[in-house]
Amino acid sequence: MLGLNKKDTTFLLIVIALTIATPIILQPFAEGSELAQFNGGYPDLMQKIAIFGIFAVGFNILFGLTGYLSFGHAAFLGIGSYAAVWMMKLLTMNVIPAILLAMIVSGLFAAAIGYVSLRRSGIYFSILTLAFAQMSYKMAYSVLTPLTNGETGLQLSLDDPRILDGAMEGTSLPVTNIFGIAMNSSYKLEALGRVFTFNVGFYFCALIAIIAFYVAIRLFRSPFGMMLRAVKSNQQRMTYTGLDPKPYTLAAFVISGMYAGLAGGLLAAMDPLAGADRMLWTASGEVVIMTILGGAGTLMGPVLGAGVIKYLENIFSKINETVLHGWFHWLPDGIEDVVIWVFARFTGEGWHLTLGVTFMLVVTFLPGGLVEGLKRISTRIKHGSQKRDKYDDPDPEHRPEASKHVA
Amino acid sequence: MGILEVKGVGKRFGGLQALGDVNLSVQENTVHAIIGPNGAGKSTLLNCLVGKLIPDTGSVMFNGNSVLGRKPHEINQMGISRVFQTPEIFGDLTVMENMMIPCFAKRDGSFRLHAVEKMENERDLIAKAEAMLDDVGMLEKRDMIASSMSRGDKRRLEIAMCLVQEPKLLLLDEPTAGMARADTNNTIALLKEIKEKRDITIAIIEHDMHVVFSLADRITVLAQGTPLVEDTPDNIKGNPKVKEAYLGETQQV
């Protein structure tokens, strides 16, 4: 289907099914129950998972395939947001032109930054990209204030021209929409004691995410994708095979920059506001962590990583001491205080600690990321749980072969 | 006029004159060996031919065109392929992918954004790559990850990757260095077969005299950055100057 082989088609269909069912899957606990805290099926979180999934998938095209670790990809996210908000201020509240402009502008920036940064590789490349991102961040606060509105952030206002939308009525700010359907409109369904929210914004993000994911699969399987893996594997051989690695890496850099811009544009489409914080180096680090946590170089890994991190961020940061009291009120007083103190370090403001511990465990025990964990579980199920290592596998290729006579 | 003409090439690294005044002419469809003791400048010379180094003086003409100032990938596109001392292959990729990359490079040039095409639609290139793998007896290993193979197989794959581009000139940098005897003999047999079956010129740098004398049509002996003598293998064997350069006067070859 659509130029994919059977395995990839099945894979894509599963991803589509999971995406459509996200509002249900992320709402496993009944309303009002103790565990309802852990429900993630509200629009804001689901949108973020889809958007950062796109960001990480794009980042993985550069990092996973070519091995070039960019530490400044958040710059393109921020640039995409600014471009999208400007489109909404000047032209229309319809999100389509906004995200298109976001992709174009971030692609241009990626071409310029990539052209300079790719003159170096390894750690020097990472530092150069980091420097460019920090530069963008600082400039958004200083010389570019007319474009970025500095610390306040770029926002909509009532006297924006909005040429296509015509005259404004009323005194409230317009909402983002797609051909008249508001992004923030939702349909709530109550069933089985749970409330499922089907949100326009989420499904729009999900549709874009599926398209972005499909494009990534095609890219991974194309000759171009193979060339990118060749860049990672052996640039010397590549050069002496008559190929110039530079335009290949630059193309990968621009494509992943455009993915980041698309994600930034979608963030603005969900909430028409752009601030320089999105370009901070911690945001660049976050996408690196997402990709590695999920599994760099795999198709599903970055999406999984983005999902896990955004879920942890939103759910764990909500759990405060009052909630913890509710959980542990049955413990004797002295012990309760101790337990709550310990848990409070990992929740609320301390959710970064949970993320750090998770990241450490995954990197130590599953170097291939969460995807490797899933693979191991599926082999366990198929082959039983006896202890296995690589020497147990049948290996027909690797026995001492009689040296072949050349004929 | 040879296919490769090296005239008056010199290269200096700081205080070291690595190459003095090298003149070399490699004739079409021959195997030309360059031998010499350690530090004679063999690798420097080779690097000057493929664009890794730019000589201080002199000229290098390939097929009537100068290679000086061109980048390695441009020189490869002119028809020079290089085999390295330690096999340089794409270790993370499968054997078949290793073969497909040079096929794409030959057909599409040094860059093409073939992002929407599909691998399985490139039937011509796949057939070409498979035929080449079959020629070197590696077809049944097509789906192996290249880095998991033995040194001999890696060398064989590297040679196949160069040959599938149908280069006019194949440069070999100590192709049997660090190999077991059986692998060395296999490589010699493979190179002999290539020499007989294909229209190809081979320039080979080698330490192992066994390899040199079983393959070469002409031999250039390099010592201290200048060619000492150029002759046929039989004449080189008896040449006292060569013995001296290699072994000192008193010893026998």
Image: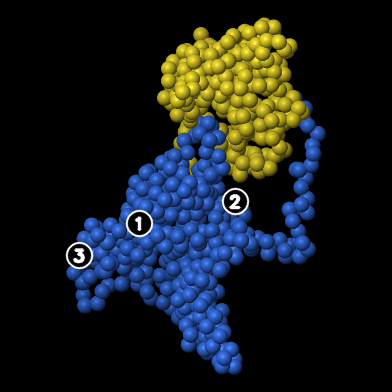
From the rendered image, report the letter of the chain displayed in blue: A
Residue linked to disc 2: A5
Of B57 and A239, nearer the camera is: B57
Residue linked to disc 1: A134
Three-letter amino acid code at disc 2?
A: Asn
To which chain does the residue with label 2 belong?
A
Q: Earlier in the sequence, mark 1 or mark 3?
A: 1
- Verify CB contact (< 8 Å) between mark 2 and mark 3: no
**In this view, A243 is above or below B5:** below
Q: Position of residue A251 (x, y in %)?
A: 43, 45
The answer to whether residue B90 of the structure is visible from this angle is yes
To which chain does the residue with label 3 belong?
A
Three-letter amino acid code at disc 1?
A: Gln
**Which element type, helix, strand or loop, lies under badge 3?**
loop
**Which element type, helix, strand or loop, lies under badge 1?**
helix
From the rendered image, report the letter of the chain displayed in yellow: B
